Amino acid sequence: MRKKFIAGNWKMYKTTAEAVAFAKAFKRLYADAGADAEAGVCAPFTQLAALKDAFAGSGVKLGAQNVHFEENGAYTGEISAPMLKEIGVDYAIVGHSERREYFAETDETVNKKLHKLYEYNILPILCVGEKLDQRDAGKAETVVKAQVEKDLSGLLPAQIDLLVIAYEPVWAIGTGRTATPEQAQEMCAFIRRTVASLYSAAAADKLRVQYGGSVKPDNAAEILGKADVDGALVGGASLVPEDFIRIVNFSANA
Ligand code: PGA
């Protein structure tokens, strides 16, 4: 049975003081809630060390939002996997559509980043998803399949067991326009079938596939109730502890 995993993606929000205040409040809520799901927060690099301390003992997982694919080198402004490992992060988001769109992330660099993260036992949250014109042209599955195939290239079956893939239709991110629960289920199931054909049914069965794109406290239960939706990657609604706990505890809102 796959445990649902709700990860917050804070993007470029919060100072470290604000992040620590969130952690203190959220830790209490999470402890009281008898949570339905594993929870995690993917924060800006500057906040990670303070959050590691602030979340200590809570079970809340900590993630970065990006990583460089090289070990070290002359890459001004970049952060490497060993640097993240030293802080003790559990996860790193790779291939978010904002990085693909604004920072020239390609399937090739995404693939290299996945390999580097596994070398350091940091688990990737790989983001894939189609744009609106691609969905309208009936190409959502083709686009997502190509991303999954290229991004996972060369990974071993044991690595796939630990992977999280976030299906994030680009048209639903930050727009308030959520995919319907049926669309989310369809695409998450499609991603699982794609992984089954690349690896095995057993690996696909362990893989956790999140949905992301305008997940809010009020729509979480319906989306997370779907069989192949194993969690959510939550942007805006992960910034406020009282909102985020309602998503983590989605069944209470069902
Ligand atoms: P959103 O962002 O929940 O604000 O739509 C989701 C994401 O970008 O991961």
Image (tube, helix red, strand yellow):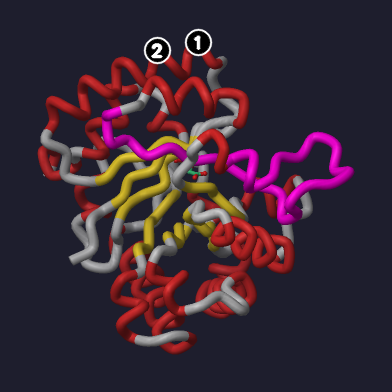
Residue range in magenta is 57-84
Q: Secondary structure at mark 1?
A: helix
Question: In the image, what residue occupies the spot 44% across and 89% down?
Answer: 197
Spatial separation of the CA atoms under disc 2 and disc 1: 6 Å
Quadrant that contains the C terminus: top left
Query: From what the image shows, is residue 202 above or below residue 219?
Result: below
Where's residue 247, x and y in %?
A: 26, 38
Residue 137: image quadrant is: bottom right
Among the 4 quarters of the image, the one containing residue 225:
bottom left
Q: Is residue 142 left or right of residue 90?
A: right
Amino acid marked by disc 1: Ala
Please give the name of the residue rendered at 73% of the width and 68% of the height, measured from the top-left corner.
108
Name the residue nearer the viewer: 152 or 245.
Answer: 152
Name the one closer to the observer, 193 or 157.
Answer: 157
* Mark 2 residue type: Ala
Residue 100 - label: none
Tell whether position 69 is magenta.
yes
The quarter of the picture where residue 151 lies is bottom right
Q: Are marks 2 and 1 in contact (CB under 8 Å)?
A: yes
Look at the picture and state if 201 lies above or below 219: below
Q: Position of residue 143 (x, y in %)?
A: 59, 74
Looking at the image, is 171 positioned above or below residue 158?
above
Where's residue 133, x and y in %?
A: 62, 64
At x 27% / y 45%, what residue is drawn? 38
Kindly identify which numbered label has been placed on residue 17. 1
Mark 2 = which residue?
21
Mark 1 Cβ inside 8 Å of ligand 1: no
Q: Is residue 73 visible?
A: yes
- In-front residue for pair 32/88: 88
